[in-house]
Image: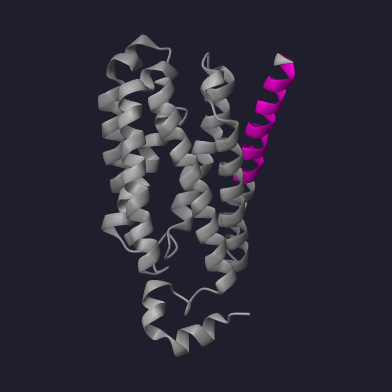
């Protein structure tokens, strides 16, 4: 079994790529695996977006998500190591593609004519404001060294909006059950990491529990829809 402190001491150059000095092998594996599940979610959203001309990521969540990715990919640096730094940058460009789809097809999620008319400038302005907010949140010391608190704040928002937008949407068939499961599993793995690495950060832990409940409700709503169709 690999010991992170042994790896840190024996391979200091490796620890600049993957931070074995501050994180255990188990914790890094949880973060990496959770990230892979989210990459699958992004891939499904992008593929289905071009195929169906509909984007399932809620319009408001897309703005905060892109802002978080940009902030942690280019403005501040995670202490997880260079592998995760470049992973965040790849993640950002996937998110940028989703944001392009949001600007192109996002009006299908909306029903208020005034919001539909101005949703593109509102969405772009939201990204700018979220980015400023995240940067200030981080440099003023409210976030963790790898962005867990800010990430889970917007994940609560996203998980809430997913359930609300799905249940109120006339495009329910365009939402992916596989993406819903991968999103829930990815967040769950990250949540286990939070409990292991931040055992005394109770607010952050509460956010992870809320996200899990919301993801569970979202998956359950899919099952109810399938049952109704049958």
| Side (left or right) of 33 relative to 145 | right
Residue 43 drawn above or below residue 167? below
Q: Quadrant of residue 64?
A: top left
View extreme (top): residue:
113
* Residue 32 drawn at (x, y percent): 50, 60
| Side (left or right) of 39 relative to 135 | right
View extreme (bottom): residue:
10
Quadrant including the N terminus: bottom right
User: By what rule are the colours in the image chosen?
Assistant: one colour
- Which residue corresponds to the image point at 43% horizontal and 12% vertical from the top-left? 111
Q: How many marks?
A: 0
* Residue 185 drawn at (x, y percent): 61, 47
**Depth order, front residue of 185/77:** 185
* Residue 56 drawn at (x, y percent): 47, 28
- Segment colored magenta: 210-228
- Which residue corresponds to the image point at 36% horizontal and 10% vertical from the top-left? 113
Q: Is residue 185 visible?
A: yes
| Side (left or right) of 40 relative to 125 | right
**Depth order, front residue of 84/129:** 84
Q: Is residue 140 visible?
A: no
- Which residue corresponds to the image point at 39% horizontal and 35% vertical from the top-left? 62
- Can residue 120 be found in the magenta stretch? no
**Depth order, front residue of 129/79:** 79
Residue 84 drawn above or below residue 116? below
């Amino acid at each position: 079994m690999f010991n992170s402190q042994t790896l840190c001491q024996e391979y200091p150059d490796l620890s600049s790529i993957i931070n074995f000095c501050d994180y255990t092998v188990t914790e890094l594996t949880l973060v990496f695996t959770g990230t892979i599940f989210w990459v699958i979610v992004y891939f499904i959203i992008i593929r289905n977006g071009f195929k169906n001309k509909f984007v399932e990521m809620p319009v408001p969540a897309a703005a905060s998500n892109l802002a978080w990715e940009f902030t942690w990919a280019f403005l501040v640096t995670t202490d997880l190591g260079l592998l995760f730094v470049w992973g965040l940058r790849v993640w950002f460009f996937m998110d940028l593609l989703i944001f392009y789809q949001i600007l192109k097809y996002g009006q299908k999620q909306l029903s208020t004519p005034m919001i539909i008319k101005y949703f593109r400038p509102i969405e772009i302005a939201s990204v700018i404001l979220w980015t400023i907010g995240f940067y200030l949140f981080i440099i003023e010391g409210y976030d963790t060294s790898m962005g867990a608190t800010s990430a889970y704040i917007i994940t609560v928002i996203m998980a809430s909006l997913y359930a609300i937008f799905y249940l109120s949407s006339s495009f329910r068939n365009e939402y992916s059950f596989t993406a819903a499961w991968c999103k829930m599993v990815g967040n769950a793995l990250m949540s286990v990491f939070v409990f292991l690495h931040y055992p005394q950060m109770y607010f952050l832990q509460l956010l992870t529990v809320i996200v899990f409940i919301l993801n569970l409700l979202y998956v359950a709503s899919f099952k109810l829809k399938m049952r109704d169709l049958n």
